[in-house]
């Protein structure tokens, strides 16, 4: 050792990675060199510091999300098993058996499942090192093709494994919940509706797309928000559920795309029909949230979607006298926690 | 099929805090950790049959979680920087806003420092130094030799040194602050009777993934 011991060499020395003769030299050097002795101590403190960093327990919300994700997966498996047995038959529960508008409170497993799904959206295969990179669906694209036909997951299961045992009661119950989500969600799109007192402008059709539950860990994602009864104040908001999975680097482009697709979201404001005037389940206080972040300005569009696996509301507010829009990306705590603003930026609107 | 999810749910629940800690500290972001953990859990559930009765199921679970984390990091690293918004700033915003139990300043600093490390070094340090897994177990989780784990930890510690210097408390001359504030973990010195040959491994590590 000439001069002093480098950080790397000292770290290797401490880890027992050096050949004996080098270790001996450093050992001897340490007894005479206070600078290197301090380096030695500093490296010890790195480990101490890491060890002293607390590791919080899993947040309860995440535990619930994971439980629900597992339940949904089990339901999908059970349902695909069932479908496999019945050939290409319908899903476990006949569509008619599922009431369309369901108060979320009475069907906790539905909202639970729905709450899970955003994080899982668009991933064909979990990232475990086995999946090829880049399998994520492109952002802003609904995933009608995100189906899991029966038997398509055979890669993860032994041959013939699926059809042998009947699904458990639990699995059936979960499959039912999953089916309910699917039916309400339709193709993954719930189109513009007023937050309260309004009508659903269009609907991709609860009955239009009776996918089997097994196919629908995907489309259920944006669904839960459509299930809740009106809970917010009677403000009119142009709420859409674009199904977009917003991404960090793509936010402006995605917002533009959504603005283009939902250029005229407002349905006839006079319409008053009985029906699910839904405040998004994830954002029961959406109106308060919007006014918290945007003040008195009337938003052009509020998109209930997901960002990094969490439900978010994307609030787009035109700037008067310009073509610019302001965009807020807020989380579910909104309007609490300062609006729970995840991102805020301005960008050119589209006309 | 019946009972699978129940049994697996119990298994996962038993380990979830540890797995969460691994994911959270490896990724340094609560949202990413949640996503990785969910992916890992589903993947493990789908493959659970092949591991039924395996005594190393804990290691297996950890391995899947770590792989999911590393996969996420690699994909993230491979993704080209996008125009428009500063991704890092947004990420920081998201992390700051979204974590349910905010970390202390120190934990945030440590997390930030860890994020500067290559993923493999980070994963090794999180397991060994942060969470106290024995080197042998970390090696099993990471699917590499013990020597490689040690080497990755060593490289990582050296790289963290300057980044964590400010956390070692007011420097009294000659006496590192933190070493006295926090009882130092037992870090073995050079061990002549080291079980694993390490020379070639560290050479590989030096050439391969360092810097």
Image: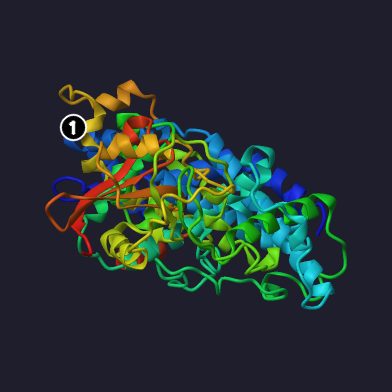
Q: For this view, does B49 lie left or right of residue B110?
A: right
Q: Nearer the viewer, residue A307 or B135?
A: A307
Q: How many marks?
A: 1
Q: Which subunit holds the residue at mark 1?
A: A
Horizontal and vertical percent for residue B89? Answer: 24, 48
Is residue B73 placed above or below A337 in the rendered structure? Answer: below
Q: Position of residue B182 (x, y in %)?
A: 36, 24
Q: Residue at x 47, y 72 (%)?
A: A135
Percent x, y for residue A189? 51, 63
Q: Is residue A289 visible?
A: yes
Indicate left or right for B74 with A31 as reference.
right
- Compared with B24, A146 (above or below) is below
Across and down, in percent, residue A281 comes to 53, 43
Q: Quadrant of residue A253?
A: bottom left
Q: Quadrant of the N terminus of chain B?
A: bottom right
Secondary element type, mark 1: helix
Query: Which residue is at the front of the view, B4 or B61?
Result: B4
Relative to A16, A107 lies left or right? right
User: Does residue B158 appear in the picture of this structure?
Assistant: no
Residue at 87% across, 68% down = A164
Image quarter of residue A48? top left
> Is residue A254 positioned above or below A288 on the image?
below
- Check the picture and name the quadrant holding the C terminus of chain B: bottom left
Residue at image position (62%, 49%) is A113
Instruction: Mark 1: give few (<14), some (14-19) or many (20+) Cα within 10 Å.
Output: few
Q: Which residue is mark 1?
A: A34
- Residue at x 35%, y 34% (from the top left corner): B107
């Amino acid at each position: 050792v000439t001069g002093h011991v480098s950080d790397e060499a000292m770290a290797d020395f401490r880890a027992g990675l050096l050949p004996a003769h080098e270790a001996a030299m450093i050992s001897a050097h340490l007894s005479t060199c206070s600078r290197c002795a301090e380096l030695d101590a500093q490296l010890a403190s790195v480990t101490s510091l890491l060890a002293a960093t607390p590791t919080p327990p899993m947040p309860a919300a995440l535990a619930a999300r994971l439980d629900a994700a597992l339940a949904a997966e089990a339901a999908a498996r059970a349902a695909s098993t069932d479908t496999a047995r019945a050939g290409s038959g319908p899903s476990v529960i006949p569509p008619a058996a599922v009431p369309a508008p369901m108060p979320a409170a009475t069907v906790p497993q539905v909202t639970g499942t729905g709450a899970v799904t955003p994080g899982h959206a668009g991933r064909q295969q979990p990232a475990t090192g086995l999946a090829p990179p880049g399998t994520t669906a492109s952002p802003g694209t609904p995933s009608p093709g995100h189906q899991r036909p029966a038997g398509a997951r055979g890669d993860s299961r032994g041959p013939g494994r699926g059809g042998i045992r009947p699904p458990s009661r639990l699995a059936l119950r979960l499959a039912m919940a999953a089916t309910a989500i699917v039916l309400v969600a339709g193709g993954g799109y719930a189109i513009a509706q007023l937050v309260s007192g309004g009508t659903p402008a269009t609907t991709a059709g609860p009955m239009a797309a009776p996918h089997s539950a097994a196919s629908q860990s995907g489309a259920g994602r944006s669904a839960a928000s459509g299930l809740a009864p009106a809970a917010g104040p009677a403000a009119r908001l142009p709420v859409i559920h674009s199904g977009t999975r917003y991404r960090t680097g793509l936010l402006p482009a995605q917002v533009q795309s959504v603005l283009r697709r939902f250029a005229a979201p407002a349905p006839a404001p006079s319409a008053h029909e009985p029906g699910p005037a839904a405040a998004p389940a994830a954002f029961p206080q959406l109106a308060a949230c919007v006014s918290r972040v945007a003040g008195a300005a009337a938003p052009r569009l509020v998109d209930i979607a997901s960002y990094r696996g969490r439900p978010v509301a994307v609030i787009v507010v035109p700037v008067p006298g310009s073509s610019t829009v302001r965009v807020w990306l807020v989380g579910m705590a909104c309007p609490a926690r300062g609006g729970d603003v995840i991102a805020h930026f301005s960008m050119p609107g589209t006309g | 099929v019946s009972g699978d999810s129940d049994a697996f749910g119990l298994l996962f629940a038993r380990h979830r805090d540890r797995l969460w800690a691994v994911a959270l500290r490896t990724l340094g972001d609560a949202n990413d950790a949640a996503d990785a953990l969910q992916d890992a859990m589903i993947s493990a559930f789908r493959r659970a049959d092949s591991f039924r009765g395996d005594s190393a199921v804990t290691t297996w679970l950890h391995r899947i979680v770590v792989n999911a984390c590393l996969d996420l990091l690699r994909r993230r690293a491979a993704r080209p920087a996008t125009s428009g918004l500063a991704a890092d700033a947004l990420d920081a915003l998201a992390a700051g806003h979204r974590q349910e139990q905010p970390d202390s300043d120190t934990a945030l600093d440590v997390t930030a420092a860890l994020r500067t490390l290559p993923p493999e070094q980070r994963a090794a340090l999180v397991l060994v130094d942060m969470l106290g897994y024995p080197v042998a177990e970390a090696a099993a989780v990471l699917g590499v030799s013990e020597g490689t784990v040690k080497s990755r930890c060593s490289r990582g510690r050296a790289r963290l040194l300057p980044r964590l210097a400010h956390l070692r408390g007011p420097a009294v001359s000659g006496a590192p602050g933190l070493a006295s504030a926090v009882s130092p973990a037992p870090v073995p010195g050079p061990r002549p009777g080291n079980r694993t040959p390490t020379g070639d491994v560290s050479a590989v590590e030096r050439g391969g993934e360092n810097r």
